[in-house]
Image (spheres, rainbow, N blue to C red):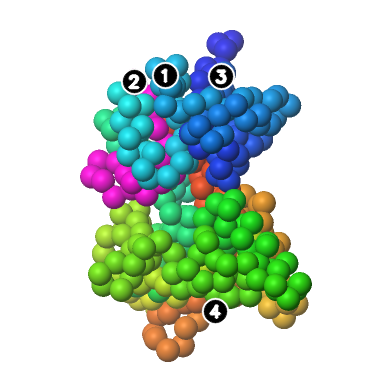
Amino acid sequence: MLEKKKYNIAVVGASGNVGREILEILHEEKFPFNDVYALASQNSFGKQMSFGEKIITVDLLENFDFSKVDIAFFSAGSAVSEVYVPIATSKGCYVIDNTSFFRMQDGVPLIIPEVNPKDIKLAEKTKIIANPNCSTIQMLVALAKLHKDYKIKRIVASTYQAVSGKGRAAMDELYYQTKAIYETSSVAPEQFTRQIAFNCIPHIDEFLEDGKTKEEWKMEVETKKILDNSIEVSATCVRVPVFNCHAVSVNVEFLEDFDMDDINMIFSDSDDLILLDRVSENIYATQVECSKSDAVFVSRLRRDTSVKSGLNMWVVADNLRKGAALNAVQIAFLMIESKII
């Protein structure tokens, strides 16, 4: 029997929220790795990190030779990806990029393995695969199932995004602000434009000229690129005082009417998500219960009676896992299955 091929891996931004999850998931999912390199900036250089039963030491990104690895996961921000992804690919390394920098570039596949796996073949030319926005991923895992049988005309999405999506410092700010309020004190906002404790902030990423935020723009254009360019999409993205796990309220309008029993059956039969929707028993998904899960949860399925062919749903997923790290590792498995690497 031939020995299964193993791959050398680099994780850029290994000390961040998503980087730590990638390391954890590579071990959990028994990815066929050989050597694994944790890379970061000078701030984290020399840091000791757990990797399964091992301890690995963070190396400097700027000194790393990418010819030593087959796949590099980038989760250190767009500015880092802009500089170092071309260096990595020039050394023959495939890159799975968790930032937004390459997502809308022509020829770069934007992949959700459950939704558009065939697009992975585009990576043979660019050696770059982009990981979509966290909220886009969970929404489209749900909607792709419906779009196959009932063509979607329009999507209106409102997100309830946890602070972990902005990083560890944002999580700390929520914790310390909440604690300070109970102690009749205060902590000035640094990670957000407003106090995040006991508050909702309709502002994620920068504002664009048309009044949208860049986060809202990402959801709109990424949905078109991944699912169907003809679908109209409108998004409102809100940061909420939850540590981890994103939720999305989704309103869908189809081209034609649908059968509600069939919609329930499509979700019930899916291996890619969990339908948790027994409202008579108060059973539905919330962010607290879904944190650290790999699944996408769908709840509150109901007709939108204001239009002929409308549907409402509530979609919840762990933004650090399926919304980022897990999807990235699934892309790596897909590359192997597709014989790209």
From the viewer's perspective, is the residue at label 3 or at label 1 nearer?
Answer: 1
**Mark 2 in CB contact with mark 1 (< 8 angstroms):** yes
Q: Residue at x 30, y 73 (%)?
A: 211
Q: Viewed as shown, does residue 177 lie left or right of 215?
A: right
Disc 4 marks which amino acid?
Answer: Arg
Labels 3 and 2: the sequence-earlier one: 3
Q: Which residue is mark 3?
A: 35
- The quadrant where residue 30 appears: top right
Quick one: SS at disc 3?
strand
Q: Residue at x 58, y 53 (%)?
A: 169
Labels 2 and 4: the sequence-earlier one: 2
Quick one: SS at disc 1?
loop
Point out which mark residue 65 bears.
1
- Magenta-tinted stretch: 91-109
**From mark 2 to mark 1, how far is it between C-alphas?**
8 Å
Assign the C terminus to one quadrant of the image.
Answer: top left
Q: Which residue is mark 2?
A: 91
Number of marks in picture: 4
Q: Residue 34: x and y, percent?
A: 57, 18
Disc 1 marks which amino acid?
Answer: Asp
Q: Residue at x 58, y 46 (%)?
A: 17
Q: Viewed as shown, does residue 229 lie left or right of 205?
A: left
Q: Nearer the viewer, residue 258 or 228?
A: 228
